[in-house]
Amino acid sequence: MIIICPHCGPREISEYTYVGDATLVRPDHNDVDMEKWVNYVFMRKNPRGSHTEHWQHTAGCRAFLRVERDTVTHEITDVVLEGPWRMKDCLLYTSPSPRDRG
């Protein structure tokens, strides 16, 4: 599986670390409802199809990425920088258009 890092370009999956499910919403820090915290920490869905995940490019630029991936085919449809790595004036890798790939 190849993930296209916006900074480094296409890289093998072995350069990345799966960080977690990007669809989860963390309860408020002051929320004392134990059921909300148990669901957030321990309960996970096993989605089939399109799913959004957090990954880190640990063997490269160390950026955190939000990756949209099909869990059946492993096709990656979108990669977005997360956190402080989302810089406005940063030169990012752009993949060739389908016409240029031949």
Image (spheres, rainbow, N blue to C red):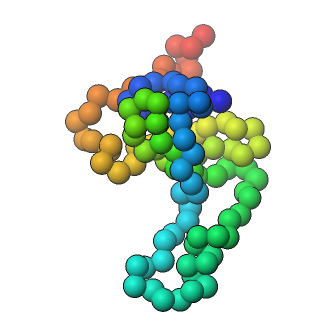
Seen in the image, is 5 located left or right of residue 21? left
Please tell me which residue is depicted at 77% across the width and 43% down the height of the picture: 72
- Quadrant for residue 89, please give it: top left
Percent coordinates x, y for residue 80 in the rendering: 45, 43
Quarter of the image where the N terminus is located: top right
Percent coordinates x, y for residue 4 in the rendering: 51, 30
Image position of 44 with respect to 66: above or below: below
Q: Nearer the viewer, residue 58 or 69?
A: 58
Quarter of the image where the C terminus is located: top right
Which residue is situated farthest in the bottom direction here?
32
Q: Is residue 67 visible?
A: no
- Quadrant for residue 93, please give it: top left
Q: Is residue 33 visible?
A: yes
Please tell me which residue is depicted at 43% across the width and 44% down the height of the picture: 64
Q: Nearer the viewer, residue 24 or 80?
A: 24
> Exactly how many numbered labels are in the figure?
0
Image position of 39 with respect to 68: above or below: below
Which residue is situated farthest in the top direction here?
102
Percent coordinates x, y for residue 27 in the rendering: 48, 77
Image position of 93 with respect to 31: above or below: above
Image position of 3 with respect to 88: above or below: above
Percent coordinates x, y for residue 76 in the rendering: 61, 37
Please tell me which residue is depicted at 29% across the width and 28% down the height of the picture: 91
